[in-house]
Amino acid sequence: MAGKGKKKPSLEEDLGRLAELDRGPLDDAARAEISRVIDGSGSLVVARAARIVKERSLTGFEKPLVKAFERFLVNPVKTDPGCNAK
């Protein structure tokens, strides 16, 4: 997880971590990881996290997903060029 003094995970690292999380039980740590990527990752990662939320019928992610959606509406050609997250 990215923190003070740590570099932000790459796209590949975030997607790989989400794939790992999706294969196992979603405990509090896994849910926190999903929240982290929804709050601060790029459109491809947020789209994958949203898919996990939908497919696993997870609750409690409504507000972060709406906030991410709104984030990708600002300068959408740059922030979500393939409309993956939207």
Image (tube, rainbow, N blue to C red):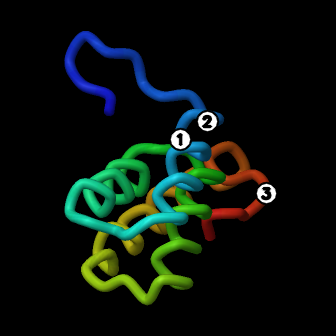
With 30 as the anchor, is 29 left or right in this view?
left
User: Quick one: 33 or 71, which is closer to the camera?
Assistant: 33
Badge 1 element: helix
The answer to which quarter of the image holds residue 16 is top right
Q: Nearer the viewer, residue 17 or 85?
A: 17
Q: Nearer the viewer, mark 3 or mark 2?
A: 2
- Residue neighbourhood size for the residue with mark 1, other residues' Cα within 10 Å, grouped as few (<14), some (14–19), many (≥20): many
Mark linked to residue 14: 1
Q: Give the CA separation, mark 1 to mark 2.
A: 5 Å
Q: Which residue is mark 2?
A: 11
What is the quadrant of the N terminus in the image?
top left
Element carrying mark 2 = helix
Say left or right for 78 vs 61: right
Whole-percent x and y of residue 81? Answer: 75, 51
x then y, percent, for residue 53: 46, 77
Quadrant containing the C terminus in the rendered view: bottom right
Under mark 1, the amino acid is Asp
Look at mark 3 in the image and give the residue it sits on.
82
The percent position of residue 70, horizontal first and vertical second, equals 45, 66
Vertical order, 52 against 76 (above or below): below
Q: Amino acid at mark 2?
A: Leu
Q: Residue furthest right?
A: 82
Q: Quadrant of residue 4?
A: top left
Using the rendered view, name the quadrant where residue 61 is placed.
bottom left
Identify which residue is drawn at 32% across, 58% down: 30
User: Are the residues flagged by discs 1 and 2 in contact, CB closer than 8 Å?
Assistant: yes
Tell which circle, 3 or 2, labels the residue nearer the N-terminal end: 2
Answer few, some or many: residues within 10 Å of disc 2's Cα (few below 14, many 20 plus, some between 14 and 19).
some
Task: State which mark lies toward you, 1 or 3.
Answer: 1
In front here: 79 or 56?
56
Q: Earlier in the sequence, mark 1 or mark 3?
A: 1
